[in-house]
Image (spheres, helix red, strand yellow):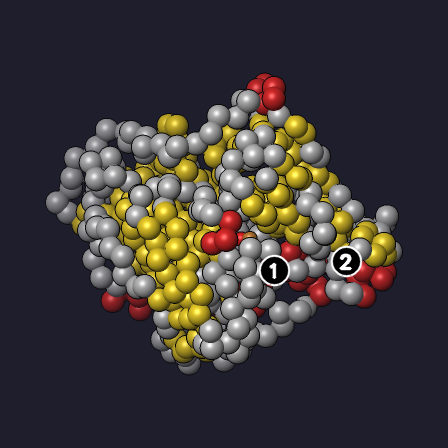
């Protein structure tokens, strides 16, 4: 028997042991050490065996860290894996030495060793942390957690609950064992390592009791390595309040939400389901739409609040496109299109066949993997715009470290601040950012199957 989502959801009625929705969150520092180590957790439904994972502090997702804006985060990474690791603080605008990229910003942390991260939390928002070494395997085995930075007291939205929802998928065998096919060439050259088992906070279906008419803040984080979630809502009025940790100028009412790997969305939702009814967040998959989160509305009915106000902004630079330098980027390769012109890998010019033989399938401007010279050498304070043309037959989630960017849209409009942009097959979209954070910053596809087979580069700011 294979483990499929349909079978799991058929048995999902057993999820009723979930506690009442958590009240408004308070700042808490929590753990001061994250120990990366093997662990065993109940990941599959209760009638399956436990699953061997790699976890931070034996938890999947890793412990949610809640801090106030302006706090200094001090975190020791302790490596009890049998291979080197690091922690990358995804979406944080932090000093380069704290960015957690082995070989670029720090040495990999060998087994049995520690590394101390310490940096100020400049921005309030929803961020996450994960390894940046052997990322496909380490993230796929469970190493990922959420970092919430709270807005200042008095500037937080008025909500009845604040909950982190980590969306993930797993590639599991029928005995609830994570498949170890991390080097599968088909995944690398196609859509990445898609799972066959979807979870929210490592559960097949999350169920909560919520007040009818109440307002919740939901912090959605996609920690999957390839899956682009296409979410639908029932019994909820939904506003998008922030993307990738950065508030929107105005909350945006929406009925659907696409969340690519590594992206976050802060939603403010009003429970419009009547007492006794169920509100749902569902994922649209090829074979149907499946509930991921079920919210049981309970009475007494509360009065719906007026539409939400924007979250307080973070301190962002001004993008002046007139002063910007343009550096075009072309994404090429993968199944169907390939690399007809070959590419340069580790300083060697190679044809497509030789590259494929070396497990390399993708190129950025003809460069395969991390080149010696950065894609962009920016001077501090310079504004850079990068039109990205996706000539491949697949979607990619382009992530810039250390700085957020905005999308430049038709007619001179700018999109919201983001750190990860989804480009569908054939799309060209342009981003712009102010190179205001000195250091060497990775710029890569956040589908690690693609990253490890060519889709990574870097931007230097000096
Ligand atoms: Cu989420 Cu290069 O990282
Ligand atoms: Cu990709």
Q: Nearer the viewer, residue 108 or 167?
A: 108
What residue does disc 1 label?
Answer: 103
Q: Report the residue marked by disc 2.
A: 346
Tell whether circle 2 marks a residue whose Cβ is less than 8 angstroms from ligand 1. Answer: no
The vertical placement of 356 against 295, above or below, is below
Label 1 CB sits under 8 Å from any ligand 1 atom? no
Q: Residue furthest front?
A: 462
Q: Position of residue 281 (x, y in %)?
A: 38, 49
| Frontmost residue, 302 versus 11 | 302
Which residue does the image show at 70% across and 63% down from the upper left? 186
Identify the image quadrant of residue 11: bottom left
- In this view of the protein, which residue sits in the foreground, 40 or 135? 135
Q: List x then y, in percent, for residue 43.
A: 41, 71
Mark positioned earlier in the residue sequence (1 or 2)? 1
Badge 1 crowding class, 10 Å Cα cut-off, few under 14, some 14 to 19, many 20 or more, is few
Q: Position of residue 431 (x, y in %)?
A: 59, 33
**354 sits left or right of 245 in the view:** right
Q: Which residue is pictured at 34% across the width and 54% down the height?
A: 73
Instruction: Single out the mark in the foreground, 1 or 2.
Output: 1
Vertical relation: 323 (above or below) 419: above
Which residue is depicted at the point 39% across and 75% down?
Answer: 41
Mark 2, secondary structure of its residue:
loop
Q: Quadrant of the C terminus?
A: top right
Cα–Cα span, label 1 and label 2: 14 Å
Please give left or right for residue 170 compared with residue 461 in the image: left
Pointer 2 local density, CA inside 10 Å: few below 14, some 14–19, many at least 20: few
Q: Label for residue 38?
A: none
SS under mark 1: loop
Report the residue at 72% width, 52% height from top: 371
Res. 393 visible in picture: no
Q: Position of residue 196 (x, y in %)?
A: 54, 65
* Horizontal side of residue 357 vs 207, given as left or right: right
């Amino acid at each position: 028997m294979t483990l499929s989502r349909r079978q799991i959801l058929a048995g999902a009625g057993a999820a009723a042991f979930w506690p009442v929705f958590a009240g408004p969150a308070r700042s808490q520092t929590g753990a001061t050490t994250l120990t990366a180590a093997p662990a065993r957790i109940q990941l599959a439904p209760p009638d399956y065996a436990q699953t061997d994972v790699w976890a931070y502090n034996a938890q999947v997702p890793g412990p949610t860290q809640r801090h106030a804006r302006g706090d200094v985060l001090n975190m020791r990474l302790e490596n009890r894996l049998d291979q080197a690791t690091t922690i990358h603080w995804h979406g944080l605008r932090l000093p380069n030495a704290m960015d957690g990229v082995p070989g670029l910003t720090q040495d990999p942390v060998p087994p049995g060793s520690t590394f101390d991260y310490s940096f100020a939390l400049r921005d309030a928002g929803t961020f996450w942390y994960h390894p940046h070494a052997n990322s496909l395997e380490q993230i796929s085995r469970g190493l990922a957690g959420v970092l919430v930075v709270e807005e200042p007291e008095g500037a937080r939205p008025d909500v009845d609950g604040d909950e982190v929802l980590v969306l993930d998928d797993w590639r599991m065998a029928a005995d609830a064992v994570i498949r170890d096919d991390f080097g599968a060439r088909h995944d690398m050259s196609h859509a990445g390592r898609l799972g066959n088992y979807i979870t929210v906070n490592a559960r097949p279906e999350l169920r909560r009791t919520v007040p009818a008419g109440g307002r919740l803040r939901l912090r959605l984080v996609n920690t999957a390595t390839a899956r682009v979630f296409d979410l639908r809502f029932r019994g909820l009025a939904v506003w998008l309040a922030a993307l990738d940790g950065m508030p929107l100028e105005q909350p945006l009412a929406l009925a659907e939400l696409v969340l690519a790997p590594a992206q976050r969305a802060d939603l403010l939702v009003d429970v419009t389901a009547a007492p006794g009814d169920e509100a749902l967040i569902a994922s649209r998959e090829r074979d149907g739409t499946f509930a991921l989160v079920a919210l049981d509305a309970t009475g007494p009915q509360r009065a719906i609040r007026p539409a939400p106000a924007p979250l307080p902004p973070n301190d962002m630079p001004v993008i002046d496109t007139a002063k910007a330098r343009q550096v075009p980027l072309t994404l090429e390769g993968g199944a169907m299109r390939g690399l007809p012109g070959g590419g340069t890998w580790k300083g060697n010019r190679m044809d497509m066949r030789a590259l494929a033989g070396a497990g390399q399938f993708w190129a950025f401007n003809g460069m395969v993997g991390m080149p010696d010279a950065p894609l962009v050498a920016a001077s501090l304070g310079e504004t850079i715009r990068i039109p990205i043309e996706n000539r491949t037959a697949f979607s990619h989630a382009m992530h810039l470290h250390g700085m957020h960017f905005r999308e430049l849209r038709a007619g001179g409009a700018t999109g919201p601040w983001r750190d990860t942009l989804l480009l569908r097959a054939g799309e060209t979209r342009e981003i712009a950012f102010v190179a205001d954070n000195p250091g060497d910053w990775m710029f890569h596809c956040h589908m690690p199957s693609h990253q490890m087979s060519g889709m990574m580069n870097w931007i230097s700011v000096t």
